[in-house]
Image (tube, grey):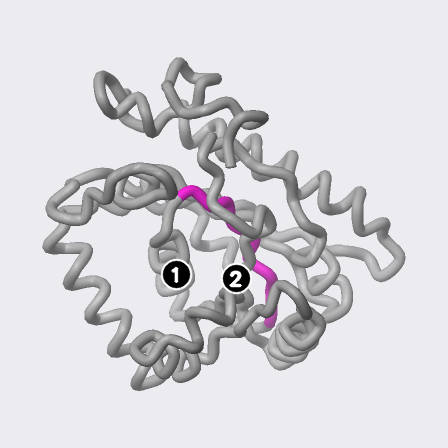
Amino acid sequence: MEPIYTGVITFARGVFAVQGLKFERTGSEHIPRTGGAVIAMNHIGYFDFAYAGYSALDVSRLVRFMAKKDVFEHRLSGPLMRGMKHIPVDRSAGADAYHAAVDALRAGELIGVFPETTISQSFELRPFKSGAVRMAQAAGVPVIPMVLWGSQRVWTKGLPRQLWRPKVPIRIDVGAPFAIASDADVEAETAALRERMATMLHAVQESYEPLTGDDLKYLPARLGGTAPLPEDAG
């Protein structure tokens, strides 16, 4: 383990315990114990990156996340992000981040990516960017789909934070890795990744504890919730 990353993990676990979060993880065995891979995740809350790392820890791995450069420029979070070897992304000029991620994948790292690029306020999958597939193809490593559910109940875009003792279940499901052939059509593979993750997400949503009353705001309209429709959401 790395001192900075280990310290952050220890601190985070303490915070999650105080909050009363209940983590339920399935599929962690799909994360390779060695070698590079792109972990593609849905994005429904501000702490998704922190929760997603739990599944990798189950197999004694660390994930390097791609995050917007503003986080690296903050006086408090910046040194931590750099110390944990996460990768800054400048959305106006993303080539440097892309090449850094490919190099890290070739060196055997796990790289965490949110193909939607931003939080889905409908809690359905937004359109995917092709970066996750392109990086995996360039580095010759697999893509591992991962879905999270419940994190939107702690803190998500456009809704009040529930940081003090939310006591909610956080579900994390990891799917089987799949390879991207060197001559594969990137857009077709990206569509296939999204379809695979949609199937996983629907299964997790449907097996999650029922949400009622005020908590319906955390549920997609498709399931009877009051979250905005995808076409109306940010």
Query: What percent of the width, then of the height, locates residue 172?
Result: 39, 45
Identify which amino acid the numbered label 1 is placed on: Gly
Q: Which residues are magenta?
A: 36-44
Count of numbered badges drawn on the protein:
2
Residue on which disc 2 sits:
112
Query: Which label's residue is closer to the chain start, 1 or 2?
Result: 1
Residue on which disc 1 sits:
53
Q: Is residue 17 above or below residue 138?
A: above
Residue at (50% x, 31% y) in the render:
233
> Could you say whether the residue bearing mark 2 is in a helix, strand or loop?
strand
Query: What percent of the width, then of the height, locates residue 14?
Result: 15, 63
Residue at (50% x, 45% y) in the render:
42
The picture quadrant where one finds residue 168 is top left
Query: What percent of the width, then of the height, locates residue 116?
Result: 58, 46
Q: Say if the magenta span includes residue 92.
A: no
Identify which amino acid the numbered label 2 is placed on: Gly
